[in-house]
Amino acid sequence: IPTDTFVPTFLSVCVAPHGIVPLDAAASRVAVACYGEDAVAIVDLGAPEGSQITHHVVGPGVVGFGAPSYGPYAAILGPSGAELVVSSTASKDVRFLDLATGAVDAGRTITLQGAPYFPAFLPDGRLVIPTQQPDAIVIADPLGVQPTETFPMGPAGCELPHEVAQLEQGLFVVCEGDHDGPGKVLKLDAAFQVVASAEVGIYPDALRPLGARR
């Protein structure tokens, strides 16, 4: 029997939370995409209970509870650490939320044909966004200077791309598949063409490095 018992603390953050992002190295503050409330919740894990959660809507006209117009599903931290990149699957766009003000910069909204999921930044600052229906990856400049490029993923056998991961080994796309058979992980080259592919388990969701091997 363990001598030490861990007792978790449960916080009611929002309706249909999905995607949690540490905002500092110690993960003392995190951001959560709140699909059902069209908002991003910022949670201060070190604050007294009841005062640690603030909500920031991702666009105008938000109803607020269970009837999403935007449907924020995924969020990542921008390279500067000053903003969140929020993918909304209902409105099919990517928005940028300033963490200092809690406001979304509507002028930088990236509107897409498909529903966006978990994106990643390239070393040059461009954003790679996986979309579903149509299944593609979209290369977009957050500053709007460089043109947007779209690469269909269907010809590569990538059904329902869910996450893009920029790792030391290169750029990867996680493909959900049809949820009955194996999904896939694809490796892309600098021209966003598939150079390697591997089947994985059913309904893969994300790719994470395991760290250095000894």
Image: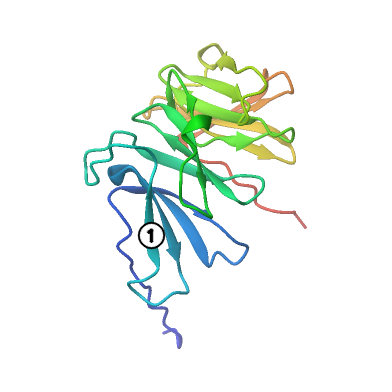
* Relative image position of residue 157 (x, y in whole percent): 52, 17
Colour scheme: rainbow
The local secondary structure at tag 1 comes to strand
Relative to the observer, which residue lies in front, 105 or 25? 105
Residue 121 left/right relative to 104: right
Q: Quadrant of the C terminus?
A: bottom right
* Relative image position of residue 94 (x, y in whole percent): 48, 32
* Relative image position of residue 67 (x, y in whole percent): 22, 38
**Extreme residue in the top direction:** 155
Is residue 203 visible to us here?
no
> What residue sits right under mark 1 in the picture?
54
Residue 70 drawn above or below residue 114? below
Relative to the observer, which residue lies in front, 87 or 201? 87
In the image, what residue type sits under mark 1?
Thr
Is residue 63 visible to us here?
yes
Residue 51 drawn above or below residue 188? below
**Extreme residue in the right direction:** 214
Rate crowding at label 1 as few (under 14), some (14 to 19) or many (20 or more) other CA atoms within 10 Å: some
Relative to the observer, which residue lies in front, 96 or 211? 96
Residue 179 drawn above or below residue 67? above
Relative to the observer, which residue lies in front, 164 or 1? 164
Residue 157 left/right relative to 40: right
Q: Residue at x 60, y 36 (%)?
A: 120
Residue 46 drawn above or below residue 24? below
Q: Residue at x 67, y 17 (%)?
A: 193
Q: Residue at x 54, y 11 (%)?
A: 155
* Relative image position of residue 195 (x, y in whole percent): 70, 21
Q: Quadrant of the N terminus?
A: bottom left
**Extreme residue in the bottom direction:** 3
Q: How many marks?
A: 1
